[in-house]
Image (cartoon, rainbow, N blue to C red):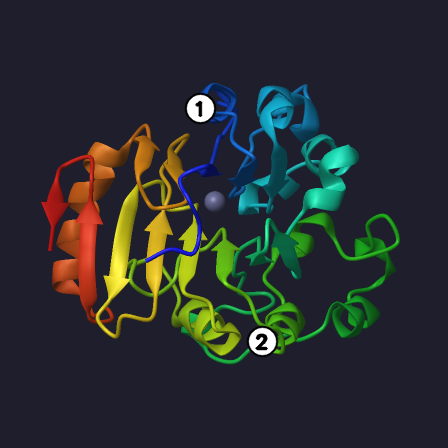
Amino acid sequence: MSCLDAHWLFGGDPHGGFDPINSIASLTQSPVTILLGDYGLEAQSLAEALEPARGAGDVYWIPGNHDYESDAVYDLTFGHKLAQHNLHGCVTTIGGVRVAGLGGHFQGRVWHPRSGKPRERTRAKCLATIGKGNVWREGLPRKLRAAIWPEDVAALKEQAADVLVTHEAPSCHPLGFAVIDDLARAMGVGLIVHGHTHLTYRFDAAEGDLTVLGVGLRGVTDGVGEARVFGAIDYGKAKQLRQASAAGRRPAGRFHVPVRGWVW
Ligand SMILES: [Zn+2]
């Protein structure tokens, strides 16, 4: 199901708690660690918070929706030497694997796929209309920078990749979006790994062409989909997912939720 091996690690939303990902990365000397957003930084920069993992190998990341909440949080997240390892909006070849990144979240002001067509497509056009008082650091307001922009999705669609890492979930999750499935398939991606929904799970699409890994709150999952650390609230979230997926529409496929040993 995966073109990766068990030495790769994915870290779910830390929200201030970096011990699990740092511990496992150090213990296993992981050559590649990828973080999926929502860092909850208060004093240390992202580079500082991930110092132990960086001692083991290369650390990459995408931003989540909470990483734009104040000027201080923004600077701690984006203003340091790990900035060049931000995977958002591009395809990066890591150990021979092409990894595409899509951070941030859908915002109604720009584009919320459940509300129809995008209201904005490009940052440049939006910036031209927002009025001088809203300009932040010579560009878009800080919170709008957390949006998923149609221009970024369109640019990614023109490229090929093996893995897509996102903050938002694809459509197998009841809170997810088919736009992300469509992006993955357009890029030839076989594996999506996402954060944000705070549950460790795997979903194998019935078509056999796509696997999704959700990584829980402060959870750690490896490159072959094994949960090394369950998310902190996986147990309750698993029940919610099962109930919601039974009630709603979702693509055909099979869920695996390791914290409860459930497969359905
Ligand atoms: Zn989030």
Amino acid at circle 1: Ile
Q: Earlier in the sequence, mark 2 or mark 1?
A: 1
Determine the secondary structure under disc 2.
Answer: helix
- Name the foreground residue: 239 vs 108: 239
The answer to whether residue 195 of the structure is visible from this angle is yes
Residue 122, position as x, y percentages in the image: 72, 73
Q: Which residue is mark 2?
A: 157
Which image quadrant is residue 217 in? top left
| Residue 88 seen in the current view | no
Residue beneath disc 1: 24
Residue visible at 59% across and 47% down? 62
Quarter placement of the N terminus: bottom left
In the picture shown, does residue 160 fall above or below 60? Answer: below
Instruction: Judge the density around disc 1: few (<14), some (14-19), many (≥20) Cα neighbours within 10 Å.
Output: many
Query: Residue 138: image x %, image y %?
Result: 88, 54
Report the residue at 43% width, 56% height from top: 3
- Amino acid carrying label 2: it is Lys
* In the image: residue 193, left or right of residue 174: right
Q: Are marks 2 and 1 in contact (CB under 8 Å)?
A: no
- Quadrant where the C terminus sits is bottom left
At x 31%, y 36%, the residue is 227
